[in-house]
Each structure stands twice: as structure tokens, then as C-alpha cells.
Amino acid sequence: MDLVNGISAVVNDSVVTFMEVQMFSRRALETAARRSRTQSEFDEESLKLQKAALEQLIDRRLIVQEYKSAGYNLPESIVDDILKKQVKREYGDQVTLTKMLRQSGRTFESFKQEERDML
């Protein structure tokens, strides 16, 4: 799969891109690359991992849409607090996160929306 910004799935009015699937499965793919003895073994495992990641992302989109349609709303202050802790834990600081997002062609707002949806 060479499409970076191609559409992997459409869930009602939400699009899951190939890049999202890659980012979501990144750690598992890195582990598979280290464990695989051959390229064909890695390719096979990679397809399985990406399929599982896509299914999880679709499930998450469906859950979020159901949550929103039921009228629930997560307070922005809670999202901001959790996001600050996560940025510090996973990226060290906001600058490092911003550089990583820029390299992958994403914005902080899209990152924040994804994290809100995961909550």
C-alpha cells in the first residue's frame, strides 16, 4: 500500500485515512519488523496488523458517533487536562509533538480531535 493520504474507509460521515491506519498500527508494525525473519513474513503480519487497526478505528468512529447522537458531551477542560498529561508522557513537550505532527502532515487540532474521540 503506497497511498499515504488515501481513504481506507468511510464511516457514515467520517473518513479513516490510510495514514491514520499506519499511525495507529505503528508500534505493532515496528515490533513485527524486529520479530520477522523474512520480508514475506513481515508483509503477511503487516497486512494483519493494518486490517486489525482499520477495524479498531472503524469501531471507534461508530462509538463516537453513537456517543454524539445520544447527546453526550465531554467537557473541554477534561480533554485539555488529559491531553497535557499525554503530551508530556509520550512526547516530552508541546514542541516535540508539533514537530512530529508537522512531519506527518497533521495539525494539532486534528490530533486533539483524535484524542478526544479516543476518550
Image: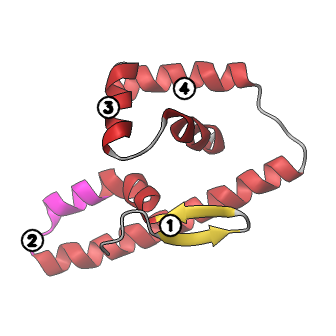
Q: Nearer the viewer, residue 4 or 67?
A: 4
Q: Which quarter of the rendering shows the N terminus?
A: bottom left
Q: Is residue 109 above or below residue 49?
A: above
Cβ atoms under marks 4 and 3 closer than 8 Å: no
Give me the disc on residue 54: 1
CA gap between label 3 and label 2 equals 33 Å
Of tags 4 and 2, the one toward the viewer is: 4
Q: Identify residue type, mark 1.
A: Leu
CA gap between label 4 and label 1 equals 23 Å
Of tags 4 and 3, the one toward the viewer is: 3
The answer to whether residue 14 is magenta is no
Q: Which quarter of the rendering shows the C terminus?
A: top right
Q: Residues within 10 Å of mark 2 (few under 14, many from 20)?
A: few
x, y (%) of residue 38?
9, 75
x, y (%) of residue 22?
37, 59
Q: Identify residue type, mark 3.
A: Lys
Q: Which residue bears the numbered disc 4? A: 83
Q: Earlier in the sequence, mark 4 or mark 2?
A: 2
Q: Identify residue type, mark 4.
A: Leu
